[in-house]
Amino acid sequence: MTGGRSLEARLIARIRRKADHPAARGLRDDVARLGDLVMTHDTIAQSVHYRADDPPESVGWKLVAVNLSDLAAKGADPQAALLSLAIGDPTKDLAAGEWEERFLTGVEAACESYGLPLVGGDTIALPKGAPRVLGLTAIGRAETAPSRSGAQAGDTIWLVGTLGDAMAGLALLEEDEDAAGTLVEAYRRPVPQLAAGRALAPYAHAMMDVSDGLLLDAQRMAEASGVAMVIDLGALPLSDAFTATRGDDQLFAATGGDDYALLLTASPFDARNVTTCLPSGTIMTAIGRVEEGAGLRLHDSNGPVELPERLGHEHRSP
Amino acid sequence: MTGGRSLEARLIARIRRKADHPAARGLRDDVARLGDLVMTHDTIAQSVHYRADDPPESVGWKLVAVNLSDLAAKGADPQAALLSLAIGDPTKDLAAGEWEERFLTGVEAACESYGLPLVGGDTIALPKGAPRVLGLTAIGRAETAPSRSGAQAGDTIWLVGTLGDAMAGLALLEEDEDAAGTLVEAYRRPVPQLAAGRALAPYAHAMMDVSDGLLLDAQRMAEASGVAMVIDLGALPLSDAFTATRGDDQLFAATGGDDYALLLTASPFDARNVTTCLPSGTIMTAIGRVEEGAGLRLHDSNGPVELPERLGHEHRSP
């Protein structure tokens, strides 16, 4: 994967260099803009972004949810989606087309749950033996769409959601493909924080979703904003299911990815104010502060903590 | 491919049944709508929609051009594009990433030629051995966006562009992979009829692009509009390059596909009127008339001509 990784990075850098249009925030940020519309596209491939034996319904759900998470991070209302469905070989004991039918069931369930109309797209057949490749373009409408580059020294860093559940769930699946429960569900059926994103967008100086690991995404926000992000590992929100399995392994939680939590910075006053508007049950936690300077720094109650070598996983392009 | 074909059709039918949102014109028409925006997505796969030995620049050009052709058929101005790039194995004698770099050169050339800003997307790596899958979402703005369902009895049927060149070019390539010339260029670098589409949209009762073969696409327009389309094979516009290679094989030209011509119906008066606004060099030809009834009928100067068994090629979903 390392060779593929750097090739991806090289090609993304090339696309960015050419894309100098003001709408091309999508190449540095999570979304592109066109007037008050925000647009995002995610593509996933079998055996790269999902396990071949994941239930097809959950693959469909997740494809929609990860795109909606990008919209959530811009405070956007979902408007429309276009689906790219590349049909693969029949899977194991499924009839031809059954995988795709069940995948569509998951796509439709997520679209209905979050009010995202599926309005178009393309359906193609792949050559025999080719892994499925599935894509979704999601379009939303946002009055204010905070970028990842607006964090200001003095801001509080907030996180909406919990960390590490999905990666703990994936680890369980890798030990036992029949594993089930809260953590496995977090991996298979992430919940985009749309309502929280809408409520927080007017107050957020910078906001993005945590898809590749908190530390990697926070480092990206620090770099884009030209500030230092200082994170208190002891403050990271861990679910009961996570701690029951992993204890308080904060570094695992902070580098795993696939969380689809929201990372934002805001003035302490504004963000505390808005917590009253959040949907009930929303977990919103202050996890650090923004300072003058550059880069990412960690500490816990005992003092500074060295950055781990791997801050997150990069198979999903920024 | 037949099994794949019917599976595609079944899955498309299922997506259509669920997509009852008014914006979902894209599932019956060429594009979806959101306010004055029109949106389209095309996905292409190696060895299905392009030849593995096609120059990568031309694959990139064509991916952009086929999406722009859908916008042209709605009279839309290009606004933004999102690219899905799935990186494949190094091709033959190319270095890793060289195919993709050259593909991007073609994407960028087409985007620059037609004023389509590339504003976002996703870049992923595929598992070893997987064929490349490439997708583009194109978004345009259109004041009036004629559908394929508005053809009226009494209308003249018009075609903008010529027919058969691309398929004649593909046939040459299948005999000799080093073939070159006008017909090969028509296959590799189709020209979206954007300016003509914008000029004609206010007058067109129905308009669509001819991607799968004139006869198949005209039959789809007849069905969507609830009318009969009567086409004069003798009137079909064939290029000099085509007739030099294929003579006047009108049925080959009318069923080949990959033409990216515009098919429209309009009152005879309106369309003759607008030809003065077309870009110089535009070939616009009256090829038949719309009548009460249903289905597709052909004739030439000798009288009725039976429909061929195959009206076009369906690997590109409608």
Image: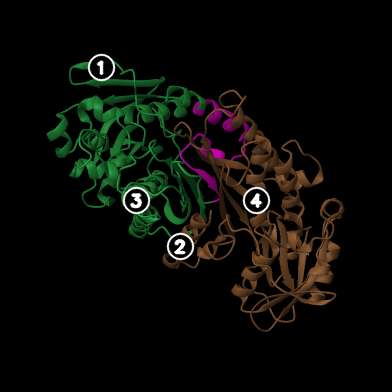
Chain colours: A brown, B green
Horizontal and vertical percent position of residue B215: 33, 27
Q: Quadrant of the C terminus of chain A?
A: bottom right
Q: Quadrant of residue A98?
A: top right
Name the residue beneath numbered marker 2.
A10
Distance from the alpha carbon under mark 4 to that under mark 3:
29 Å
Left/right placement of residue A235 relative to residue A81 reads right
The chain under label 3 reads B
**In the drawing, what numbered circle is on residue A66?**
4
Above-or-below relation of B2 to B193 = above
Distance from the alpha carbon under mark 2 to that under mark 3:
21 Å
Distance from the alpha carbon under mark 4 to that under mark 2:
24 Å
The chain under label 1 reads B
Q: Nearer the viewer, mark 2 or mark 3?
A: 2
- Disc 2 element: helix
Q: Earlier in the sequence, mark 3 or mark 1?
A: 3
Residue at 59% of width from left, 46% of height from top? A81
Tag 1 and tag 4 share a subunit: no
Above-or-below relation of A66 to B294 = below
Amino acid of disc 1: Val
Amino acid of disc 2: Arg
Horizontal and vertical percent position of residue B201: 39, 45
Span highlighted in magenta in the image:
B8-35
Q: Nearer the viewer, mark 1 or mark 4?
A: 4
**In the drawing, what numbered circle is on residue B61?**
3
Horizontal and vertical percent position of residue A139: 59, 52
Q: Quadrant of residue B297?
A: top left
